[in-house]
Image (cartoon, grey):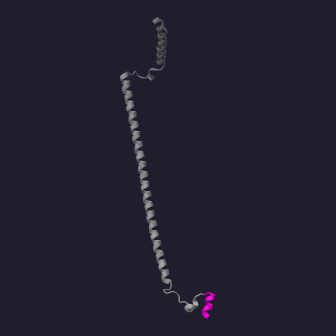
Amino acid sequence: MSNGKEAPRRARRTDQVSLSRALRLSVPAEARPAPVNRRDWLRQRKEELEAARAAARHRRNLLRAEILSAAQDIAREERSAARLEAERLKAEARSARTYAREDERAAAKFERGQPKRPAAKTKTLAREKSKLVSYAELLRLRK
């Protein structure tokens, strides 16, 4: 029974081998790759992987450097913006002090321009006459 199962499998395998051989031989000898044993192939693959890892490491380092450079640029911009804001606030405070000083001077000058004593009043009536009295009180005072 086992021979019955193996026969079709063996036939398929021989077909594959013959097809593979025919395909290999259809390519001219100078275009065919040199036969490589497994140890050399593994060494070559390992070198390729090492080179790929080194390239990836190099790209990561470049990206890291670019990110750090961008962060430094941002920090520099923030520092200059903070410095400009501080200078603006300082200038505003200075101008506010200047305006307050000018206002004080103007107020003092205005006060100096005002007369020292109140203006002389016209002659006033006697104290009693200046009071307003009701008609009844006036009649009483006349008696």
Residue at figure coordinates x 42%, y 56% from the top left: 79
Where residue 118 appears, as percent x and y from the top left, is 51, 86
Quarter of the figure with residue 128: bottom right
Q: Look at the image and tell me in which quarter the C terminus lies.
A: bottom right
Is 78 contained in the magenta span? no
Residue at figure coordinates x 45%, y 72% from the top left: 98
The magenta segment: 133-143
Residue at figure coordinates x 39%, y 41% from the top left: 61
Work out whether residue 19 or residue 61 is closer to the camera in this orientation and state it: 61
Q: From what the image shows, is residue 3 above or below residue 127?
A: above
Q: From what the image shows, is residue 20 above or below residue 54?
A: above
Q: How many marks?
A: 0
Q: From what the image shows, is residue 90 above or below residue 125?
A: above
Q: Main secondary structure of the magenta part?
A: helix
Is 137 contained in the magenta span? yes
Q: From what the image shows, is residue 27 above or below residue 93?
A: above
Work out whether residue 30 or residue 8 is closer to the camera in this orientation and state it: 8
Work out whether residue 87 or residue 121 is closer to the camera in this orientation and state it: 121
Quarter of the figure with residue 34: top left
Where residue 93 appears, as percent x and y from the top left, is 45, 67
Where residue 72 appears, as percent x and y from the top left, is 41, 50
Outermost residue on the bottom side: it is: 143
Residue at figure coordinates x 47%, y 5% from the top left: 1
